[in-house]
Amino acid sequence: MNKETYCLLENCMLCCMEDSAHDKEHIYRVLYNALEIAKTENNVNYDVLIAACLLHDIGRKEQFENPVLDHAIVGSEKAYQFLLAHGFEMSYAEQVKQCIKTHRYRKNNLPQSIEAKILFDADKLDVAGAIGIARTLLYKGSVSEPLYSVMPNGSVSTGENDIMPSFFQEYKYKLENLYSNFYTEKATTIAKERQQIAMEFYNSLYQEVNLSYQNGTNELNNLLESEDGLN
């Protein structure tokens, strides 16, 4: 891929990125992750891989405006039409489309080509470790979702069985379980290196807030009971 083609694809991406948790820096990290993974794989088509990485989230705006839509499906079609409109061959546009279409984890729509598998892994690595925690917190704040839920007994929920969305619920539902769902050995290795950081952050945050609730509610109840006894 030459510089002119790269800039064309990059500019298309830059015009589409508005989500703070899925901004242009997320795209660059995914691209750089993908290039690192690709060094350990054979027969990678870098022209397809780079284009797919740059364009993989261009359907985010449509999904944000209408949550029924799947940004991977929308984005794959947008990328396909963009490439055709700019004179790229149909076979190339189709390969990029398939990579983007399958980059989101769905059991009925799994990546097939090595480029699609690398994109999938590179994207998931950006949800792992410290960066994954930071991005999740950023997103939760942007949609006004809380850090955690409080159970009827007054203790802080771990998030494990929560229905209502929160950071703890997202961690238990998604972040905690992503470390074995990679296609390439390189991505698996990188993810495992990041896993401990995410675990330590979640456990520390839970312990801090839960202890605060336990001590605080006990102290408050004691004060309220003593006041009632004086009246």
Image (spheres, rainbow, N blue to C red):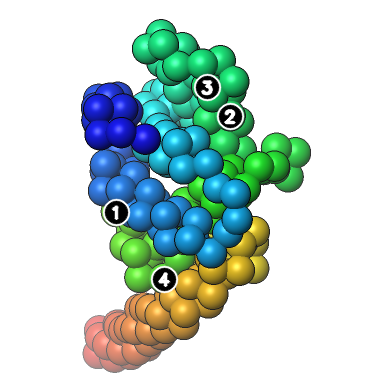
Contact between labelled residues 3 and 1, with CB atoms less than 8 Å apart: no
Disc 1/disc 3 C-alpha distance (Å): 33 Å
Residue at (31, 89) in percent of width and height: 219
Which of the image's four quarters has the N terminus?
A: top left
Q: Which residue is mark 4?
A: 129
Q: Indicate the position of residue 69 as horizontal and vertical percent values.
A: 53, 25
| Residue type (three-letter) at the residue carrying disc 1 | Leu
Q: Callout 4: helix, strand or loop?
A: helix
Contact between labelled residues 1 and 2, with CB atoms less than 8 Å apart: no
Q: Indicate the position of residue 72 as horizontal and vertical percent values.
A: 53, 32
Mark 1 vs mark 3: which is more N-terminal? Answer: 3
Contact between labelled residues 3 and 2, with CB atoms less than 8 Å apart: yes
Q: Quadrant of residue 82?
A: top left
Q: Is residue 207 left or right of residue 28?
A: right
Q: Which residue is mark 3?
A: 93
Q: Which residue is mark 2?
A: 95
| Residue 59 sits above or below residue 179 on the image | above
Which of the image's four quarters has the C terminus?
A: bottom left
Disc 2/disc 3 C-alpha distance (Å): 6 Å
Q: Callout 2: helix, strand or loop?
A: helix
Mark 4 vs mark 1: which is more N-terminal? Answer: 4
